[in-house]
Amino acid sequence: MVTKEQVDHIAHLCKLKFAEEEKERIIHEFNVTLKELEAFNQIDLENVAPTLGVNKHVQRLREDIVGPSLDRDEVLENTVEKQYGYFKLLKIVE
Amino acid sequence: MDIVKLSAVEIKEKILKKELSATEVVKAHLNRIEEIDKDINAFISINKEGALEAAEKVDEKIKNGEELGALGGIPIALKDNIVTKDTKTTCGSKMLENYRSPYDATVVEKIKAQDGIIIGKTNMDEFAMGSSNKTSFFGPTRNPVNTNLVPGGSSGGSAAAVKAEEVALALGTDTGGSTRQPAAYCDIVGIKPSYGLVSRYGVVSLANTLDTVGVFGRDVSDAALMLSAIVGYDEKDSTSYENPTHLVVEKDLEPTEYIKGMKIGIPREIYLDQIDKRLIGVMDKVIKVFQSLGAKVEEITLPHLEYGLSTYHVISAAEISSNMARFDGLRYGYRAKEYSTLDELYINSRNEAFGDEVKRRILMGTYYLSMGLGREYYEKALKMRTLIIDDFNKAFKDYDIILTPTSPILPFQLGKLKDEPLTKDLTSIFTAPVNLAGLCAMSIPCGYVDGLPVGLQIIGDRFKEMNIIKAGLAFEGGMKNGI
Amino acid sequence: MAYKTIIGLEIHVELATNTKMFCACPNTFGGEANTHCCPVCLGLPGSLPVINKTAIEYAIKAGIAFNCKINTKTKMDRKNYYYADLVKGYQISQDDIPLCEGGYIEIELEDGAKKINLQRIHIEEDTGKLTHTMDGDTLIDYNRSGVPLIEIVTRPDMNTPEEARLFLEKLRSTLKYIEVSDCKMEEGSLRCDININVVDTETGAKTNITEIKNLNSFKGAVKAMEFEEKRHIQLLKEGKNTVRETRRWDEVKNETVTMREKGEAEDYRYAVDGDLAPIEIPDTWIEEIRNKLPELPHHKKERFMRQYNLSEYDAGVLTASKDLASFYEETLKYIDDTKLVSNWIMGDVLRRLKDEEVEIEDTKLSPKALGQLLSLIKSGKINNNTGKKVLREVFETGKDPEVIVKEKGLIQITDESQILEVVEKVLSENQQSVIDYKNGKDRALGFLVGQVMKATKGKANPQLVNKMILDLINKM
């Protein structure tokens, strides 16, 4: 049902990697789960509207008034590398 | 008096009456933690100085005759996916092992404003994914009832901390049962409030349309006290409900008074093949208790309950995959040492810092959102969710509360649950549908079976917390009176 | 061999709101790196978005201005992908229900107006900014992360780079007119991506679409399109095809360069953002916005032509800027002569603005003053030349023209007998010029008029002087 190529493709999309042996397990898990999900086909969903959220209220819109920002030190506190007030990476980006 | 055996309500009263000081209370609980947490591993970080400082402030207030907040002097633990400025927030993961949030979650601000004393952050399944607390990077938590058993998860640390008398109250989170199930396994009360009742600002997202903050207490009054202090509209949370319910519980009524006039439904669908057969006897006893208190108990049907777990699995995985994308090692969190492209930075960091369960769910969620791959399942699950909600709406037209066992599986030994997909999630079969519908629910102890604690789930309609609290108080009273 | 170029544009415009799209951090260009950030726009764990009302308002304004349908029930979706400038690993944007749908912008071509249809306008948030240092590091500044954007997607209705340029000009001037953005391409508040390909109309062969990104100016965009057009046509001529890819415009080399191969379309796994509630726009709010919308440039131009009987050219000049147009109309309240006012504004006033490099609202000239000045001229109290002098005074001092004229004694002499006296004197003192004129030297007349003007310190009415001199000479 799920192929190794598909697993590779999805892993690439979500930036994860798996060892070859792990992939076997993953495919097995997918297949077991997807079989379970076939149960959805027992129900006629043709005229059922999807639920995107349980709330009935409508989005409250915020007034366009400036509020406090973080100090730069707080912004950079948790990063591994920083310089001149910027976050830093080795040049690996196009 | 053994301070740690006092309930939160009692602690508060004694502090107000000046029979105890907040500092004494905190010290007693810190000692307890030192004594026992090496066997339980409920805590990831403990803020000793902060707690003692807060206790001092409370004692100052008492001395000056100032009014105390609703949580005055009560020691409280927070699940480690609720951000705090004073301590790190790890989510039980290597990814955030040293993360310091520059802001407090709204619920944390509320606790501080009500003079609650935050003792520390509790252990949890990594990023709240799991139901046994075994996937934490900081080692598994043990069940204080019997340390061979799991405490449940993902809020296992908070539940264990309350049961082990390390704190009087605790917060957890609940996405598919992560507060109710550990409450059941640890023999305490856990409440999952209606979606939108408690602010999610500062609670690390697992699944945005399912997550709520949950509360733990050793009895219903304690849990209700914790809940009442944290409810309320928060403009920083766009999913926050703008007309919050007030939770004022009339004290010391007779159980029959609490339950008067309530109609109770038991869904016939709970009698599944997978349910531990011993629970059937327990449910029979529960029904008798409520009936003897004067409530009407009838069988109802929730026809789509059996699809709840699959529906929950797909929707939660999809939302998880998106919410976990921000953990890439750039701005915070674990960053791999070796990388030569941006992609490698992402892949290596995430690979080295995420545990298996987290990676698994992200992968599946990504699959379910991908066009041409699993997207169809996601679209179908959204519709199944509607049917499940409709089932509940129909039931709540005629009934005030619905009862189920909290979990179809009794507390198990660490490592003993089959690690098969969906099997290991079976514990959520009765709890997950509640999250899908955004309802409120309580897990309340209803006795032991072969030395294993059993939890009863009391489900209420959206924003009808008073119903489940009253039913809980009635049941508690009934059990105490030895019905 | 006939080739048809097909161009579609995707334009991102930063909205000129005070705060970002989902948080209250300031939305300002510049500023020290990472000083306009908060948990929300940094995507810190636990942070949640709250939508900026003014951003929605500005998006609706743009939708109305471009004749779109406003979707009153809409939502925000997550566009999932990874990049160093994207803090959450997803961008909050809109997928299947954009805020505005359809719509069009008209451009003026030589043979008439052409409608460029829009597909949609939706709201989303901007990303941070990457800079590369000489040492080979990448530095990231998240000040821009979360700034509100509208994305405008056109249908592939443009067929020449010039049409695309006209479209962009119209788009920009309209957005500036309705004060939704300052549209500065150099500052990045307007960004344009181009989709271009070419069809051989005889064989039906068509090239793969090239996407062009990283354009810094309209000029650059036009050059890039022209380059691509040629490249596509050349490949068709050779029986080849383009690769489906993204290219960027290299200003130095003056050519497009491959950025990345497109391959398969990126899978963004769009799904609703569960942290936000559905958005509902009341019809009353849309009406309120529509009523508050300033009259758009082309509407104003048409109205000026109609209402004030102006030529298309004149109306165009006067409505090019909102402030100039309202200055014109204000002046008309003080003097009811549309042609006179338009002449003076288009002439002396605009010249002054151009020389001093100022906008009309920065000068000391008020519509009232101009109206007063033109009334003086029209009534004959002063002549044109004097008028120009007075205008200069007003620009310098801001004094009322009537005050200036009084102070400097500039009132035109209209008493004919007074002028006749001077004319007779001048003629008698300049007999040679009279003879010269009679002998056919026309310039002598101008000299004589000039002498009278000098003697009267410019206050005589030149036309009257001219007539009088001729009358007298003819009698001689």
Image (tube, coloured by chain):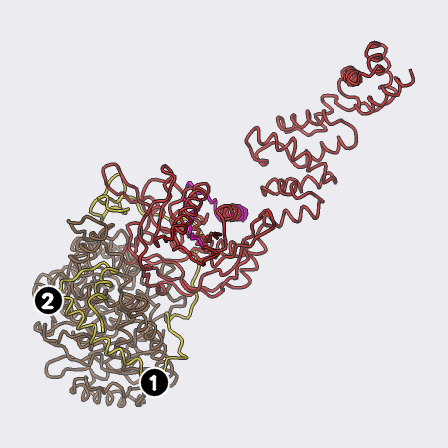
Q: Is residue B97 left or right of residue C113?
A: left
Q: Along the line of sight, which residue is nearer the eye, B241 or C345?
A: C345
Residue C343 x, y percent position in the rendering: 69, 35
Q: In terms of sequence position, does the residue under pointer 1 or pointer 2 come before the other?
A: 2
For mark 1, give the secondary structure.
loop
Q: Say whether mark 2 and mark 1 are on the same chain.
A: yes
Residue B40 is tagged as 2
Q: Residues within 10 Å of mark 2 (few under 14, many from 20)?
A: many
Closer to the camera in the image, C221 or C101: C221
Q: Secondary structure at mark 2?
A: helix
Q: Quadrant of the C terminus of chain B?
A: bottom left
User: Of C168 and B292, which appears nearest the observer?
Assistant: C168
- Circle number at residue C298: none
Q: CA distance from mark 1 to mark 2?
A: 39 Å
Boundaries of the magenta span: C173-199
Instruction: Residue B15: give x, y in percent of width and height.
Output: 22, 63
Q: Residue at x 20, y 74 (%)?
A: A31
Chain ID for label 1? B
Q: Are marks 1 and 2 in contact (CB under 8 Å)?
A: no
